Amino acid sequence: MAWGLSIIGHVPAEPQVLAALTEAVQRQPDAIPLRLHLASLLLESGADEQALGHYLAVLDREPEHQDALLGAVKAAQALGDGKGAALYRARLNTARGTEPVPAQGPAADEDLETEEGSKTAGRAWWDVEASSVTMADVGDSGPARWVVDGYQTLFAEAREQAAFDVLLVPVGAGSLAAAAARFGAAAGVAVIGVEPETAACLTASLAAGRPTAVENPGTTMAGLDCAEISPTAWPSLRNGIQGTVTVADSEVHAAMRELAALGLRIGDCGASTLAALRALATEDACAALSAAAGVSPATRLLLVASEGVTDPEGYARALAGG
């Protein structure tokens, strides 16, 4: 069992005002003007990741909201995410009707202008061929960013169903975990990533302070068997994740048996978060992360089970203790 810890610190202006507004937004998540006001104050105070999370929450509800798109441009720029800023700028121009989105051809390679007038060079975020759009949750493309945006909706919907203080999420290439980190920054929820011991690319990256590839000799958590973090996911994970816990296959298999006893058919990747919770509660090596995240017997936790039984034979072996 291993763990990684990333302490997140912001020094926002007028903390009492920000706290009151945050509480108000949590009570009224659909109050868009209130959320935009909070986002603007967070951006002014330097809490760029939290501000971006609120702007994206507005865009989940109103994808063409111009104030939210402009705020997302500014927040992405403040985070040093030039391509993200270009994406939101392109969406803003489309919403304003001032810049049509080209399907393909030379225009797709043109520089994209940011809010301050600087240029972000490189291929545009769209990749359209024969009226279809390629979607992927890895890389640094526009579609990869859309995947993260879409995943964020899951956590907003979960919050509508039940309150929770800490969120445990499988990592893999990082798109789902990045969405969780964005949500957590906006909602005041601590987010802990979970990785296989043999494919702990986020743990290595947080320790190095930059995306770092690792050897991945194999794990039964096939969906998490990733050697490196997606470039799209890294900024949100770097700024918004509380830390990571790594788990062994044997620990995950024990968690699968525990879940099965409760009538839940959950595969290796999905059961990893329960294995991580057990480590947070019992392992000395996880004590610092557990304390930083506020994990206690009274804590309300959400464990993301990202996989059902995708490998019936492997599932049967795990339940048999093999």
Image: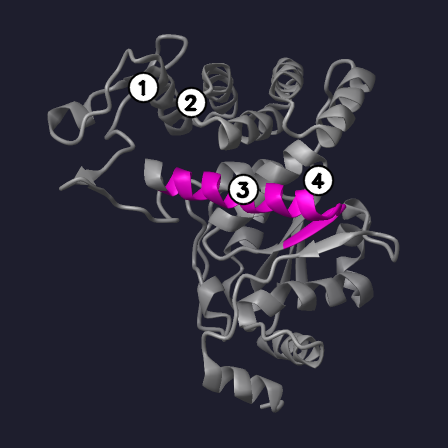
Look at the numbered discs 1 and 4 and tell me whether their residues touch, using CB distance below 8 Å.
Answer: no
Q: Dot 2, how many residues are within 10 Å of its Cα: few (below 14), some (14-19), or many (20+)?
A: some
Q: How is the image coloured?
A: one colour
Residue at point 75% right, 20% down?
21
Question: Residue 157: within the magenta?
Answer: yes
Q: Which residue is mark 4?
A: 7
What distance separates the C-alpha of mark 2 from that of mark 4? 34 Å
Q: Nearer the viewer, residue 290 or 61?
A: 61
Going 33% across and 21% down the picture, which residue do you hit?
A: 90
What residue is pinned by disc 1? Answer: 94
Residue type at the position of mark 4: Ile
Which mark is nearer the camera, 4 or 3? Answer: 3
Element carrying mark 4: loop
Comparing marks 2 and 4, which lies closer to the viewer? 2
Q: Which residue is mark 2?
A: 64
Tell me whether the residue at label 1 lies in contact with that at label 2, contact meaning CB atoms closer than 8 angstroms: yes
Mark in the foreground, 1 or 4:
1
Determine which residue is flagged by label 3.
153
Mark 1 in CB contact with mark 3 (< 8 angstroms): no
Disc on the earlier residue, 1 or 3: 1
Q: Position of residue 130 (x, y in %)?
A: 13, 42
Element carrying mark 3: helix
